[in-house]
Image: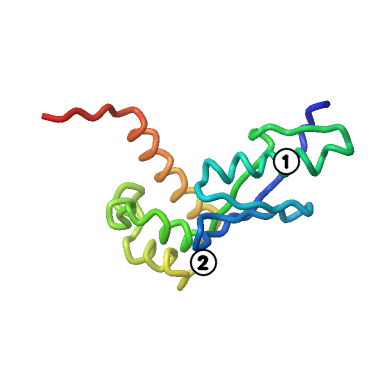
Amino acid sequence: MKRTNRRYDFIVEKTDTGFSAYCDKAPIFTSGSTITELNLNILEATNLYLEEEELEVTMKNIDLSIDLKQFFQHYRVLNGKFLAKRIGMNETLLSQYVTGKKKPSRKQVNKIIDGIQEIGRELSELNLISA
């Protein structure tokens, strides 16, 4: 098998049992109960799709997208007020994006993603102790 540099964009949707994903430019779709499982299933499904071409991909070739409303519905642990303050965005505006009342620009989406990823990096670097 030869590795390909092709990119595969998947749209992720929250379901009652976890997540589903489909590729917008190829007939590839799958599901998983968690994002980790979904990633593994996407990789497997994409490689099965490319099997006849004797090509393979890694997760570096795969991009996942989920709309803000579904993201915040699933990750309710994220406090919108805290995130808005953290990224310097009006709390009401972020709330309107989250509820789907307004559609954010690409610049605003990137600002939100960057803030979420920064918080994620900080959390992943912490070790918790019990006092």
Which element is circle 2 on?
loop
**Dot 1 or dot 2, earlier in sequence:** 1
Which amino acid, mark 1? Answer: Arg
Q: Which mark is residue 7?
A: 1
Q: CA distance from mark 1 to mark 2?
A: 26 Å
Which amino acid, mark 2? Answer: Lys
Q: Residues within 10 Å of mark 2 (few under 14, many from 20)?
A: some
Q: Residues within 10 Å of mark 1 (few under 14, many from 20)?
A: some
Quarter of the view holding residue 80 = bottom left
Q: Is residue 10 left or right of residue 110?
A: right
The percent coordinates of residue 61 (x first, y second) are: 69, 36
Q: Which residue is mark 2?
A: 103
The percent coordinates of residue 70 (x first, y second) are: 48, 61
Q: Nearer the viewer, residue 43 or 77?
A: 43
Image label count: 2
Which element is circle 1 on?
loop
In the depicted structure, whether residue 62 falls above or below residue 76: above
Q: Nearer the viewer, residue 75 or 130?
A: 130
